[in-house]
Image (cartoon, grey):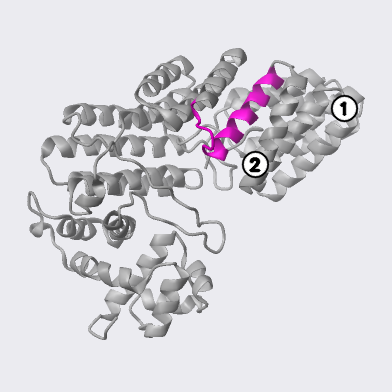
Amino acid sequence: MDRAVTDGDLGLVVRLLRALRGWNQGELAAAAGVDKSAISDYEQGKNRPSPKTLERLAAGADVSLARLESLLPLLRRTRQGTREDCAEGQDAVGAAAVVARAVGDEVLLAVAPFAADLEAGGLQPKESPGPGERGAAAQPAKAGGREVAEEGLAGEGGWTLCLAWLCEESVRAAAASAKRAGELAGLALRLAELATGGEARRSRLAGYAWAFIANALRVSGQLRRAERAFARAWVLWDAGTAGVDEILDEARLLDLEASLRREQRRPRQALELLDRARARAAGEAAARILLKKAFTLEQMGAYELALHALAEAGALIPVGGEPRLWCVVRFNQAVNLCHLERYADAEPRLAEARRLAGGQGSGLDLLRALWLEGRVAAGLGRQEEAITILARVKEEFAARGIPYDSALAALDLAALYLESGETAEVKRLARQIGPIFEAEGVEREALVSLRVFCEAAQRETATAELARRLARELAGAPRQPRRGNGPRDSGRDPFAEPRARLQED
């Protein structure tokens, strides 16, 4: 890039490189082999990277300098844009300028990854594994047969894809940060409000964005506000023109609302919404919805029906389809078979789930599979093996900073100790888990049951059945989200609840 490029332009370029990979300053610095303080100086315009350093930064983020130069006009116009410049029918570059003026450079950094990929014919930003755990490969998606590549970012389809991408990023962020999820959904809503194409189209886009705002509120524990946000989402969605944006799928809205109804302990409403979503989906999308249905049925204690839904989901995953989905199907079949005390049937499915999880390289998945392996061993009468496994699971969850699951594993372990008459160990575990569950903010009814168990453990009157009943109650008990909690159901898939099950990221 020539010297006509200002330090401010280069600051945005460096920020863009980070945004394309989803990295913080330290991660970009590590990938490029420069000091973290230098990254901060570049972004603030305090210093200018040399051409060689800029090339190293781009290479570290796996982005060509030519691609960065092609985005520079968009960066410049964004910095200079004003609300008065936005007019009906304006191209997306000008609209992006208005959005950035209204809500800051972050909108540009969220949307810019699409600019390059839409020009190249892709529908999602391509990410490469980076330092730490943030890098992940994004797969191109279909858009109802629309030739988005021909439209580019300046077309309405490209604008809609930007909004849809922000919404899905909100869901992915929700597992770790409800606040960040809300920010991304809010950016999507701002894009909807400034979209071209008329009021009906803006209403449809805004309705879609509001559903993701509702999901972020749900994840943060604000269930009443989430319900009001969903009501607003549907009013706006229905007021829009059906078919204007085939890219946006109504099944996604139904799916997200089902997660709210399940968390509100209205499982029948959740099932109705999931059935409506399933009728609008096909292939792997339908399989994911059925996996949520199976999870809801499991929570209701309808284990046979849950197994039926899992079998239907498995039938929809194509041969050679996503290994992650097969892993989740097999694992949760094993979970429901354990509920039915069919441990011998659960064992081969669990073995397959562990093999698939190992191929995906997820240590947490393997740990959850090990947890279930301990339960299967106990069910098959291999008590010593089960105790060894569950003690390891308890310690590893604690080491990973997931205290809730560590305490749940401790309850499983306590049940085995009670069956073996080792009451001293049960007393020790009860003293450990009581403060954990109370600190995690579980609902009042579950806390009452917890205190009953802990008191019984100290009096040496607790039973294995009491421990297992408490574990089931706490596994499904709503709780207020807290920093440091284990994984949550972000709204994409139901496998991130605090219990022995696999997660979908």
- Magenta stretch, residue numbers: 316-339
Q: Quadrant of the N terminus?
A: bottom left
Q: Is residue 320 magenta?
A: yes
Q: Which mark is residue 168?
A: none
Q: Nearer the viewer, residue 90 or 451?
A: 90
Q: Amino acid at mark 1?
A: Arg
In the image, residue 308 lies at what x, y percent? 56, 16
Q: Nearer the viewer, residue 453 or 284?
A: 284
Q: Earlier in the sequence, mark 1 or mark 2?
A: 2
In the image, residue 268 lies at what x, y percent? 46, 14
Q: Nearer the viewer, residue 453 or 347?
A: 347
* Up-down relation of residue 84 to residue 418 (above or below): below
Residue placed at 45% from the left, 18% from the top? 271
In the image, residue 289 lies at what x, y percent? 45, 27
* Up-down relation of residue 495 to residue 305 (above or below): below
Question: Mark 1: which secondary structure?
Answer: loop
Which residue is tagged 1? 382
In the shown orientation, is residue 27 left or right of residue 345?
left
Which residue is tagged 2? 357
